Amino acid sequence: MEGIDFSNANLSGTSMEQSCLDRANLARAILRKTRLHMTSFKFADMSSTNLREAILDNTDLRGANLISANINGIDLSGAIFCNTILPDGTSRNDHYSLGQF
């Protein structure tokens, strides 16, 4: 599903585990409580996306844009960050292993 446009979509509570969402447009999408285990989001636009309580463990977020995204309570255990733009506009370049934001 590389490059797919899910902007403004409501995908709450769905499961898209082990998907390839590289370069996807997820801006302003609602992914609350969505299971995204081992999903690839390389260079995806996730700005202003609602990811509250989503499961993103072992995901690849290299180059993803998370500006203004709601990441409260999400599980990012083992996620890969490399040039990932976080909700506050800062960039992260490492593995996040503490579990939840």
Image: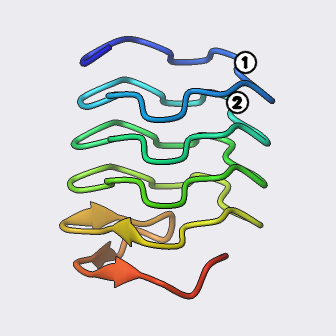
Q: Which residue is mark 1?
A: 10
Identified at 32% across, 28% down, the residue is 20
Mark closer to the chain start, 1 or 2: 1
Residue 30: mark in rendering: 2
- What is the three-letter code of the residue carrying label 1? Asn
Between 84 and 74, the residue placed more toward the observer is: 74
Q: What SS does tag 2 mark?
A: loop
Q: Quadrant of residue 30?
A: top right
Q: In the current view of this chain or complex, which residue is farthest to the bottom?
A: 98
Identified at 79% across, 42% down, the residue is 33
Identified at 67% across, 47% down, the residue is 51
Q: Quadrant of residue 21?
A: top left
User: Within 10 Å of the Cα at label 2, are there few (<14), some (14-19), or many (20+) other Cα atoms?
Assistant: many
Q: CA distance from mark 1 to mark 2?
A: 5 Å
User: Within 10 Å of the Cα at label 1, are there few (<14), some (14-19), or many (20+) other Cα atoms?
Assistant: some
91 shown above or below 42: below
Give how far across and how far down residue 38 sits, in percent. 44, 47
Q: Quadrant of residue 84?
A: bottom left
Give how far across and how far down residue 67 sits, in percent. 45, 55
Contact, mark 1 vs mark 2 (Cβ under 8 Å): yes
Answer with left or right where residue 85 lies relative to residue 47: left
Q: What SS does tag 1 mark?
A: loop
Give how far across and how far down residue 65 sits, in percent. 35, 50
Residue 52: mark in rendering: none
Work out which quarter of the rendered image holds the N terminus and state it: top left
Answer with left or right where residue 44 lies relative to residue 99: left
82 shown above or below 18: below
- What is the three-letter code of the residue carrying label 2? Ile
Answer with left or right where residue 21 lies relative to residue 99: left
